[in-house]
Amino acid sequence: MLKIAVLISGGGSNLQSIIDSIKKDSLDCSIEIVIADRPNIYGLERAAQNNIKAEVVDRKQYGRELSEKIYSLVRDKVDLIVLAGFLSILNGDILKAFKNRIINIHPSLIPSFCGKGMYGIKVHESAIEYGVKFSGCTVHFVDDGTDTGAIICQKMVPVYADDTAETLQNRVLVEEHKALPEVIKLFSEGKIKKIGRKVIIE
């Protein structure tokens, strides 16, 4: 069984989508630990409600040592690290040890509206302002850049003339909740093959 760590920074709705998929037996994995980079967020409540071990690695407290602390919690304990609305940037040894075993979900169609400073509602505000006709979400591998890793999966939604950032965010979130469990399932089945920047689903 695939063992995963889920890293969060907020409400944890993507975490919940993974939990729900496991409960429905559509995902054969176990969440070994939930790690939050902020205290007092609802995602931690979700973990508690489902008897999942959780740790807070406060980014204000750990600063540049954040990645090393997280690495100490997951080293030799999980097969895959899932960033599910995690806003801190990982660096250092954890990226080397878990190369091609860390995935992130981003609320746009990368390479649009991504990179430094592009997170949460800001992504959708930018998409609306630019006037794109379609947006969506991307699940990608994490490398030493920001939203620069190879793309595994993308899901698309229409953008309507009367959309606000909030209505677009809600539409994209529906797809996020499908995409992340799907990619974890593919990973657990060994169906993801990476050749350079190309990811092939076998």
Image (cartoon, helix red, strand yellow):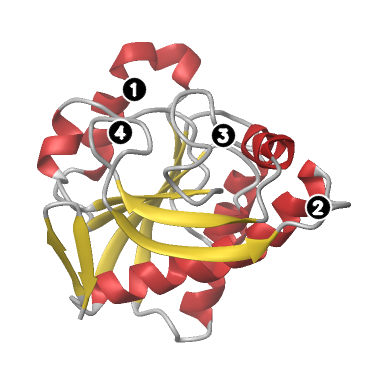
**Image location of residue 94, percent across then percent down:** 19, 35
In this view of the protein, which residue sits in the foreground, 96 or 38? 96
Label placed on residue 70:
4
Closer mark to the observer between disc 3 and disc 4 = 3
Label 1 sits on residue? 66
Amino acid type, label 4: Ile
Q: Does label 2 or label 4 sit earlier along the sequence?
A: 4
Label placed on residue 95:
none
Work out how far the residue at label 2 is from the one at label 4, CA to CA, in angstroms: 34 Å
Classify mark 1: helix, strand or loop.
Answer: helix
Q: Does label 3 or label 2 sit earlier along the sequence?
A: 3
**Image location of residue 66, percent across then percent down:** 34, 22
Q: Residue at x 80, y 57 (%)?
A: 160
Amino acid type, label 2: Thr
Label 3 sits on residue? 119
Q: Does label 1 or label 3 sit earlier along the sequence?
A: 1
Label placed on residue 167:
2
Closer mark to the observer between disc 1 and disc 2 = 2
Work out how far the residue at label 1 is from the one at label 3, CA to CA, in angstroms: 19 Å
Q: Residues within 10 Å of mark 2 (few under 14, many from 20)?
A: some
Q: Residue at x 52, y 61 (%)?
A: 51
Classify mark 4: helix, strand or loop.
Answer: helix
Is residue 1 visible in the rendered image? The answer is no
- Marks 3 and 2: CB-CB under 8 Å? no
